[in-house]
Amino acid sequence: MRLWTEAVTDRSRHDIISGTPKAYLHAADMNRIESNIAYLSERLSRQGYRIQAAEPTVWSRDGVPRVADIVYISGSIQAITRAYYEPDGYTDISDLPGKALDYTDINNVERNLAGIKALIDQGLRYSYLTHFTYGQLSGYTNAELRKGLVDFPTINDDGVSGIINYIDIRIPRQLQEEAIKQIKMRNEK
């Protein structure tokens, strides 16, 4: 299995003005980004997610990223979040291929990758909704289902209807507790 390389997310305007090494996009930066994409896709694939394994380009000192390379990086991160989750603070990077990159764009790419890794490290796992029919799920958006804040109407053995609050087990404990509070508040209204 590939290894994670710590993301660099603290590039700043000061780096640009001062001409520090962080002011430039180096082959090492591109190798780290692509290697981390491969690490995440491999790790999630092993957990059963349907993510195509990424094979990183090995960048050399004279390599210059082309639009196709940026499309690959942006698309790979988007594919991972579509199959898994967008971490808190996720920044949409779909417009990267059509613009001139600056330090904030590269910071966002690496922050997104680090955020996804943090979710995986917390044990955030996807649990397919096998207990419910499509009809029961049809009234909810994908985002609502992914957050796990879904109320399902039920009828018990006595014919009494009620609501089951479905809290998805794939979200970390702290988020589950917050979701339970939100549902209780909603039910009290």
Image (cartoon, grey):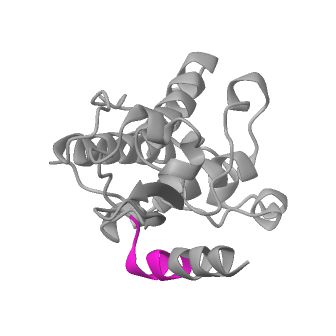
Residue located 70% across and 46% down the image:
105
Residue 23 found in image quarter: bottom right
Q: Quadrant of residue 49?
A: top left
Does residue 114 appear left or right of residue 169 in this picture? Answer: right
Residue 66, x across and y down, in percent: 60, 20
Viewer-proximal residue among 177 and 154: 154
Q: Residue drawn at (61%, 44%), measured in percent from left and top?
A: 25
Task: Classify the position of the C terminus by image quarter.
Answer: bottom right
Q: Nearer the viewer, residue 100 or 17?
A: 100
Q: Looking at this rendering, what residue extends furthest in the top direction?
A: 68
Q: Is residue 98 visible?
A: yes
Task: Tell me where residue 30 appears, x and y as whole percent.
Answer: 48, 40
Image quadrant where residue 102 sits: top right
Quick one: 152 or 33, which is closer to the camera? 152
Tell me if residue 26 comes above or below residue 59 in the rendering. below
Residue plotted at (32% across, 32% down)? 51
Overall secondary structure of the magenta section: helix
Q: Nearer the viewer, residue 48 or 37?
A: 48
Residue 90, relative to residue 25: is it above or below?
below
Whether 107 is among the magenta residues is no
Residue 176 inside the magenta-drawn segment: yes
Task: Residue 103: give x, y in percent of width and height.
Answer: 72, 51
Magenta segment, which residues? 171-178
Quick check: 94 left or right of 184? Answer: right
Q: Seen from this angle, which residue lies furthest front? A: 158
